């Protein structure tokens, strides 16, 4: 789990991410940071609900008004 220092750093830069439930190890911090930077700079109306690790992969639960299929 994340140290309070990393959590504070994230919330200081992305106040909108304060309510995001993050259940990942500290080794994922930079990847999550980079993802939030890109989301912050985009015009997408996306709300991140949770970020979890499942079988060594990052899983992001989100809500968005954009509908896309990949």
Image: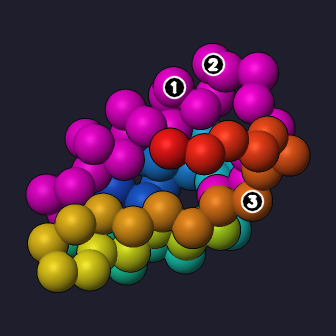
Q: Quadrant of residue 46?
A: top right
In the rendered image, which residue does mark 1 sit on?
A: 38
Q: Circle 3 sits in a helix, a strand or a loop, which is it? A: strand
In the rendered image, which residue does mark 3 sit on?
A: 63
Q: How far apart are marks 1 and 3 (CA)?
A: 16 Å
User: Is 3 left, or right, of 42 in this rendering?
Assistant: left
Which percent across, then down, holds residue 56?
14, 72
In the image, residue 17 sits, relative to residue 1, either above or below, namely above
Q: Nearer the viewer, residue 60 or 14?
A: 60
Q: Which residue is drawn at 66% across and 21% down?
A: 42
Magenta span includes 27: yes
In the rendered image, which residue does mark 2 sit on?
A: 41
Range covered by the magenta-colored residues: 26-48
Magenta span includes 40: yes
Q: Distance between the residues labelled 1 and 2?
A: 5 Å
Q: How crowded is mark 2: few (under 14 residues within 10 Å), some or many (20 or more)?
A: few
User: Is 54 left, or right, of 23 in this rendering?
Assistant: left
Closer to the observer: label 2 or label 3? 3
Q: Do the residues labelled 1 and 2 touch (CB within 8 Å)?
A: yes
In the image, residue 13 sits, relative to residue 16, either above or below, namely above
């Amino acid at each position: 789990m994340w140290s309070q220092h990393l959590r504070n750093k994230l919330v200081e830069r992305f106040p909108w991410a304060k309510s995001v439930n993050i259940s990942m190890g500290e080794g994922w911090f930079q990847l999550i940071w980079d993802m939030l930077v890109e989301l912050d700079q985009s015009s997408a109306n996306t709300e991140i609900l949770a970020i979890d690790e499942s079988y060594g992969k990052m899983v992001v639960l989100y809500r968005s008004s954009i509908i896309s299929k990949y």
